[in-house]
Image (spheres, grey):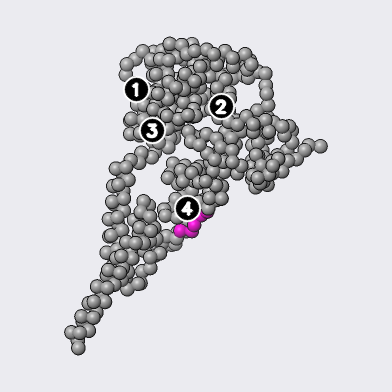
Amino acid sequence: MRKVIEFSSPNHIKTGFLSNESGYGFILNDKKWKTVFHYVEAMKFEGTFYEDKIRQASTVFQVKVLTRPRISKKFDTDTGLMIVNKVYGRDRNYFMRTDWSFIYEDVLRQAIHAKFKQNHILRKKLLATEDAQLIDKTNKKTGLILEELREELRPKDIIVTNEKIYIEKNITKDLYTSALTAFEEKVLDRLIKIIIKIRDNEKWKEILPGMIEDGIYNLGGEKMMRYTQQYIKKISWFDIYSQMPNFNTLINNISKNMKYAQKDPTQNAVMLGIVIRYIRYICTPQELESIKKLINTKEISINIPKEKRWYRANPPVTKTTKKNQRRQEIKNLNKLLKKHKLDISRGIITFSKFNSELKQVYNVNLLTTSYIRKTYNRYKNKHYTSMKRIQYERSIIRK
């Protein structure tokens, strides 16, 4: 009979490591994550400031508080109906991505794979469960993903990739000690230039993983890009160090050119390392010829793949744009205060009504609630006293 292992609490001595809330960090999307739970919840708001806020939360409990929804009601003047939405965040309204139900399982799988593949102790513990059925009481999908991963991590003598067979024990030694060739250094240099041009064209300061993938697409086409995307999901940090050609030198070179000053190898640098691996062992003669032609040309032309990229859809937020946006929001705040001048001074419009109208009609997100409250109270007190003085003067005239 098959053994069953049930787990739920991250604090359990024997099964706690299997929980998504257990504190085993990992690197994914070029960022450090404290738990799988942190990553999954943050991906609901990918590309927003709220994603980083969730990532930086110190505990799982804090993440749960941050991802607790509020009900937002907005009256639609066109239809005459009240629109009710779930919003997140205390000071600003954030909405959960619409495609979450479709991508949730893939996001969870990525996080669990990264957690176990980047920690050799966790890998050993997972393999020690042998063929036991893993059941997460809090999430049905977790157990199934862990069982799939366990099967994948089981040692195999032969790896088959793109119709080429690699004997794992022999290839790791050769790859680790071998140095980069002059051609590989040229390829790396060209790829970095392409990526930097993509970054400059989009007016970003930092280099994002999507830019790396677009750069790889421009260098070797869709096949190379797909290989890099798939390989980075499966590979562990131990495998990277053992299977990359002269990995330390490669990372230092990439870090120097891309202005990365991190002790740990970033995902971006690893992706470029995988490109070198592809060129050395997977590349066809036709692909090599096209890459050689590209390296010898002086001009760098950029072709954008069909895949959606977050960095293309969202322009970079600079200090200047933030300042301008804040100024505009302050103007909108003063505009609304003048509009409801009498109602505010008489106490007809409360702060909660005023604040909800400000955020829904004028879309104010950068100004904090405390700042809006102070401005509202100051305005109210000022006009309340002036109104009382006018009433007093009128009463004297009547007498």
Q: Nearer the viewer, mark 2 or mark 1?
A: 2
Instruction: Measure the C-alpha gap from mark 2 to mark 4.
Output: 35 Å
Residue corresponding to mark 2: 237
Residue 372 visible from this viewpoint: yes
Which of the pair 382/362 is nearer the observer?
382
Q: Residue at x 45, y 14 (%)?
A: 184
The residue furthest left is 397
- Crowd class of label 2 (few under 14; some 14 to 19; many from 20; radius 10 Å): some
Instruction: Measure the C-alpha gap from mark 4 to mark 3.
Output: 27 Å
Q: Main secondary structure of the magenta part?
A: strand
Residue corresponding to mark 4: 88
Figure quadrant of the C terminus: bottom left
Q: Secondary structure at mark 2?
A: helix
Residue 281 in picture, x, y percent from top left:
54, 15
Residue corresponding to mark 1: 301
Check disc 1 and give the amino acid type.
Ser
Instruction: Measure the C-alpha gap from mark 4 to mark 1.
Output: 42 Å
Check disc 3 and give the amino acid type.
Glu
Q: Secondary structure at mark 1?
A: loop
Q: Residue at x 30, y 65 (%)?
A: 378
Magenta region, residue range: 68-72
Residue 373 in picture, x, y percent from top left:
36, 62
Q: Earlier in the sequence, mark 1 or mark 3?
A: 3
Please tell me the numbered disc located at residue 262.
none
Residue corresponding to mark 3: 206
